[in-house]
Image (cartoon, rainbow, N blue to C red):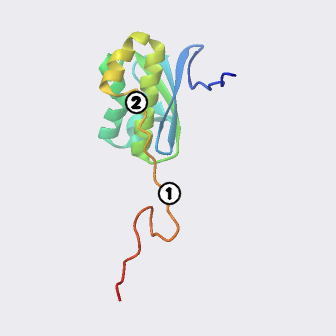
């Protein structure tokens, strides 16, 4: 029996730690550098790109939990989905990169739920229905 080769999306490369986070149709590739807490998403500052304090807080929450918010810079390339799905994908990517950076952080990140991938996606539309489950109105006569 041959072992399947597993493609990894988490690794340490040169000066940074790299990880991929996904949510719905959003995919975020995250790079963690030593720095002073600057977060850039698609070459734009996080506050400007997300334009929502709640989403910025969701992105920063894994860093705040482990106390690294002021000691690492983050560079993110994200595509697909909406702003909320992108923010959740970035959060997962940051948590995975922190896990690669220091294995000691895994317990606290896992307990807080930051390392769990949310597998929910939009259900496809079915033939004869208006949406995935919504049927046309039934007429008795």
Disc 2 marks which residue? 116
Please tell me which of labels 2 and 1 falls first in the chain.
2
View extreme (bottom): residue: 141
Q: In this view, does 4 lie to the left or right of 15?
A: right
Q: Is mark 2 on a helix, strand or loop?
A: loop
Image coordinates for residue 115, horizontal then vertical, percent = 40, 26
Label of residue 110 in the image: none
Dot 2: few (<14), some (14–19), or many (≥20) neighbours within 10 Å? few
Q: Label 2, label 1: how many angstroms apart (C-alpha)?
A: 24 Å
Q: How many labels does the image show?
A: 2
Image coordinates for residue 55, horizontal then vertical, percent = 34, 39
Q: In this view, does 97 lie to the left or right of 69?
A: right
Image coordinates for residue 65, horizontal then vertical, percent = 30, 21
Asked if one can make out residue 124 in the rendered structure from this viewpoint, the answer is: yes
View extreme (front): residue: 1
Look at the image and tell me in which quarter the C terminus lies. Answer: bottom left
Residue beneath the point at 48% across and 16% down: 100
Q: Is mark 1 on a helix, strand or loop?
A: loop
Q: In which quarter of the image is residue 73?
A: top left
Look at the image and tell me in which quarter the N terminus lies. Answer: top right
Asked if one can make out residue 34 in the rendered structure from this viewpoint, the answer is: no
Q: Could you say which is closer to the camera, residue 118 or residue 52?
A: 118
Q: In this view, does 96 lie above or below 104?
A: below
Disc 1 marks which residue? 124
Q: Could you say which is closer to the camera, residue 95 or residue 132?
A: 132
Image coordinates for residue 137, horizontal then vertical, percent = 37, 77
Dot 1: few (<14), some (14–19), or many (≥20) neighbours within 10 Å? few
């Amino acid at each position: 029996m041959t072992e399947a080769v597993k493609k990894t999306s988490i690794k340490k490369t040169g000066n940074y730690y790299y990880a991929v986070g996904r949510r719905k149709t959003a995919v975020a590739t995250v790079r963690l550098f030593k720095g002073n807490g600057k977060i850039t998403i698609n070459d734009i500052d996080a506050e400007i790109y997300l334009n929502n304090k709640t989403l910025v807080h969701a992105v920063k929450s894994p860093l705040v939990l482990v106390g690294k918010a002021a000691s690492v810079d983050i560079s993110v390339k994200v595509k697909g989905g909406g702003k909320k799905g992108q923010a959740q994908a970035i959060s997962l990517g940051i948590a995975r990169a922190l896990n690669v950076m220091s294995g000691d952080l895994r317990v606290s990140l896992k307990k807080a739920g930051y390392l769990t991938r949310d597998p929910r996606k939009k259900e496809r539309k079915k033939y004869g229905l208006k949406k995935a489950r919504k049927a046309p109105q039934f007429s008795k006569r």
